[in-house]
Amino acid sequence: MKRIRSSLFGIDQGEHIMFSDYENNGKMWSGKGTRQRKKTIVFSERFDDPPAVHVAMSLLDLDKGTNVRADAQAKNISTTGFDLIFRTWDDTRVARVRLSWIAMGALVDEESWDLY
């Protein structure tokens, strides 16, 4: 449970096209083994503490001849941003992926002073 002790609560959200590898026969489409793509996301405003971040696939385009193996995560979450990561492995052929995210947490209160 993440407790928010602030009257200033912020929600930031977005989405990012991670890749479209079928167009150029890129590694996600033509490769095998563990493959990963990362995008560093910067929040539109700084949070007071690292927020809770939820990631979801809003587009997943796969080859029908292989198993679905997909992992979407938020890593290295800080008050200013995080790394959006998509990963697949083995023989899965991924044509395109778009990830959406939402971050929720306390915002910095400019009127709050730390006296000690």
Image (cartoon, rainbow, N blue to C red):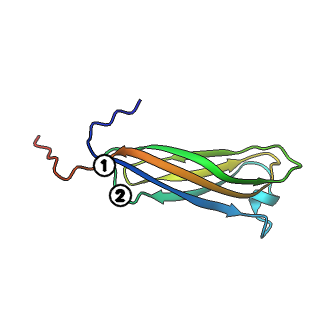
Q: Is residue 68 above or below residue 23?
A: above
Left or right? Give the position of 110 relative to 42: left
User: Mark 1 highlights which residue?
Assistant: 107
Q: Is residue 44 above or below residue 71?
A: below
Distance from disc 1 to disc 2, alpha carbons, whole Å, reads: 8 Å
Q: Secondary structure at mark 2?
A: loop
For badge 1, the amino acid type reads Leu
Q: Position of residue 36 (x, y in %)?
A: 66, 53
Q: Please identify the residue farthest to the top as the structure is shown.
A: 1
For the residue pair 100 and 71, the one nearer the viewer reads as 100
Q: Residue at x 59, y 51 (%)?
A: 85
For the residue pair 65 and 33, the one nearer the viewer reads as 65
Q: Position of residue 80 (x, y in %)?
A: 38, 54
Left or right? Give the position of 116 relative to 60: left
Q: Quadrant of residue 99?
A: bottom right
Badge 1 crowding class, 10 Å Cα cut-off, few under 14, some 14 to 19, many 20 or more, is many
Going from N to C along the chain, the mark reached first, 1 or 2, is 2
Left or right? Give the position of 69 relative to 109: right
CB-based contact (under 8 Å), mark 1 and mark 2: yes
Q: Position of residue 102 (x, y in %)?
A: 49, 49
For badge 2, the amino acid type reads Glu
Quadrant of the image for the C terminus? Answer: top left
User: Mark 2 highlights which residue?
Assistant: 45
